[in-house]
Amino acid sequence: MEIDYYASRTSGKNISSIFFGGGTPSLMPPELVGELISRIDLRWGIEIDCEVTLEANPTGLETKNFNKLAQAGINRISVGVQALNSSDLNFLGRKHTPKEALTAVETAQKAVKRVSFDLIYGRPQQTTNAWTTELERALSIGTEHVSLYQLTIERGTSFFASFRDGDFCLPDEEKSIQLFQITDEICSKEGLKAYEISNHAREGAESRHNLNCWQGADYVGIGPGAHGRITIDKTCYETEQISSPENWLNSVKKNGHGTRRYKPIPHHDRTEEIIMTGLRLTKGLERSRFEAQTRCELEQIFNPRTLKILLDNSLLELDEMGMRATKEGQLKLNTVIASLLT
């Protein structure tokens, strides 16, 4: 199995988080989920308080298994709510109803201790009042973690051609900023502080798995289309698995793994990755962690003139603890990061 292949290359490391994501992992038989968790424990060793997350769509077909999935070892469920009105769910290509979404979250809360759900905002013609009402309704059911993403249109998606042809428009920059600020204000009022630019949680309920990735730590990607970052002898390797399930499975049967890319990441490129993901965090780049990972002092990485401009304009903060984006910097984070990496 692919688990065995990567375990043999990363021996001596315990597992602090497992994330079943991508596609519809909640459709897996609970027995299979349990077998996979047991195999991971056998080959690596799972820490006692390991976070085991499973992504789920809010349909009856998937939610009916939440209790059995919990018995199999899942202790955190992330529900793909995305919107709480039918028209926007249709626009986003989702098959569930708002009622099903709320029911799924409540069912998950009864099955496991830790639950998260996501919403997409900045949708076509969405007003600040409409988003305020929707977000407050979502948070009223009680949650410890939410992922709140502004809708973006990327080339290759089903939305791209329609957006290009003018079939719909997204909020302009001013409206996008207002929506971002409203999101932060409402979540903060409910005790869900932003710990990453799109993620809010009660203290201690942050996603350990995602934090691990954003902080530049190793993670192993298993299964069709999975990506990973593993460090061997002080060199970080990029891994990517075959995306086609059929071709991936054939490769696993033949070679013991379905890897299509396994190559070292140049030090400069890896440093840039750590900067891009780290600055998304409210705590930003923690000095000790960053310097241990990159073997460089934080200030020495960046152009002094560029760094001074960003600091003087209150877009970044720099102190003995590290470097982070200010509230204003978060609103312009892509520009801030691009400036730092130029």
Image (cartoon, rainbow, N blue to C red):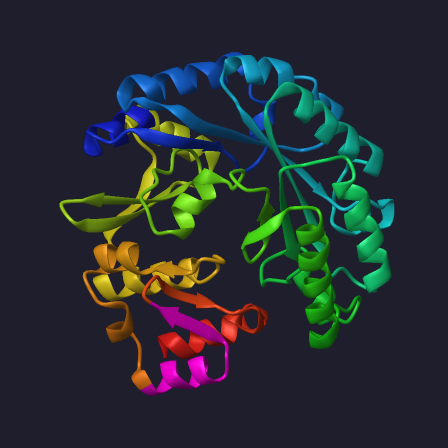
- Which residue is nearer to you in this view: 95 or 147? 147
Q: Residue at x 31, y 31 (%)?
A: 257
Report if residue 262 is visible in the image.
Answer: yes
- Which residue is nearer to you in this view: 314 or 80? 314
Asked if residue 317 is among those painted magenta in the image, a careful observer would answer yes
Instruction: Give percent across and percent down for residue 279.
Output: 44, 63
Instruction: Give percent across and percent down for residue 74.
Output: 52, 22
The outermost residue toward the front is 320
Choose top left, top right, bottom left or bottom right for residue 18: top left
Report if residue 126 is visible in the image.
Answer: no
Residue 223 drawn above or below residue 325: above
Q: Residue at x 31, y 82 (%)?
A: 303
Q: Residue at x 28, y 24 (%)?
A: 44
Instruction: Give percent across and percent down for residue 180.
Output: 68, 63
- Which residue is nearer to you in this view: 175 or 238? 175
Asked if residue 180 is among those painted magenta in the image, a careful observer would answer no
Instruction: Give percent across and percent down for residue 192.
Output: 63, 47
Q: Which residues are magenta?
A: 305-319
Residue 315 drawn above or below residue 286: below
- Which image quarter holds the N terminus? top left
Q: Residue at x 54, y 42 (%)?
A: 203
